[in-house]
């Protein structure tokens, strides 16, 4: 049994807390899904897809590892590796050119790995880029992730799901995707 210690953040489908794993005594992140979202008609499918996509990308040093999924009749939680902060929380810090290179290099390694598996994350934004005290960057939250398909960016495909303010430039101007 995990006891949540500190709220870390939240999103559309739940909240994330820091907790201590009682077996390893290590900190973990627990994404507790909002009970109201469990009533959503696609909830079970979306939860399974998020977990499947994220687990398929692991192990990789730049992808957040899922340790366990806990689902009961009244709640669901995803227990993951803990990172100290997100890129969103450090974006106002002045980083040296070397630190920026290190962050971007790790982020691109993670994205490359995800894409090499035929998966598109579709929600790369500062809230989903985690950083730990050692400077390791990890990509998290695969809730919008999906399999890459040749026509996923064309027209009004239901697969055109992305975070509003972090869309690719071609989507921002309404142009077709380029290779």
Image (cartoon, helix red, strand yellow):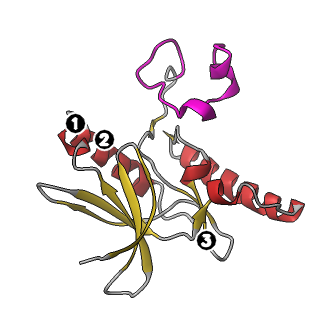
Check disc 1: other Cα within 10 Å, few if <14, some if 14-19, many if 20+: few
Residue depicted at 38% across the width and 56% down the height: 15
**Which range is magenta?**
153-179
Taking depth in this image into account, of 131 and 139 the one nearest to the observer is: 131
Is 81 displayed left or right of 172 in the figure?
left
Sequence-wise first label, 2 or 3: 2
Check disc 3: other Cα within 10 Å, few if <14, some if 14-19, many if 20+: few
Residue depicted at 49% across the width and 23% down the height: 152
| Dots 2, 1 in contact, CB < 8 A | yes
Q: Which residue is mark 2?
A: 46
Disc number lying in front (2 or 1): 1
What number is the disc on residue 40? 1
Disc number lying in front (2 or 3): 3
Q: Main secondary structure of the magenta part?
A: loop
What number is the disc on residue 105? none
Quadrant placement of the C terminus: top right
- For the residues labelled 2 and 1, the Cα–Cα distance comes to 10 Å
């Amino acid at each position: 049994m995990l006891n949540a210690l500190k709220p870390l953040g939240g999103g559309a489908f739940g909240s994330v807390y820091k907790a201590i794993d009682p077996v390893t005594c290590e900190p973990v992140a627990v994404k507790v899904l909002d009970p109201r979202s469990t009533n959503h008609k696609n909830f079970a499918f979306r939860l399974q897809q998020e977990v499947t996509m994220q687990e398929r990308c692991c192990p990789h040093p730049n992808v957040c590892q899922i340790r366990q999924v806990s689902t009961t009749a009244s709640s669901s939680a995803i227990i993951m590796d803990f990172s100290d902060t997100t890129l969103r929380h450090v974006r106002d810090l002045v980083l040296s050119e070397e630190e920026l290179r290190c962050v971007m290099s790790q982020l691109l390694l993670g994205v490359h790995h995800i894409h090499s598996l035929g998966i598109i994350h579709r929600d790369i934004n500062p809230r989903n880029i985690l950083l730990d005290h050692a400077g390791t960057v990890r990509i998290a939250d695969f809730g919008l992730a999906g399999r890459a398909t040749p026509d996923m960016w064309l027209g009004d495909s239901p697969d055109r799901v992305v975070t509003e303010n972090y869309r690719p430039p071609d989507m921002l101007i309404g142009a077709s995707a380029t290779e």
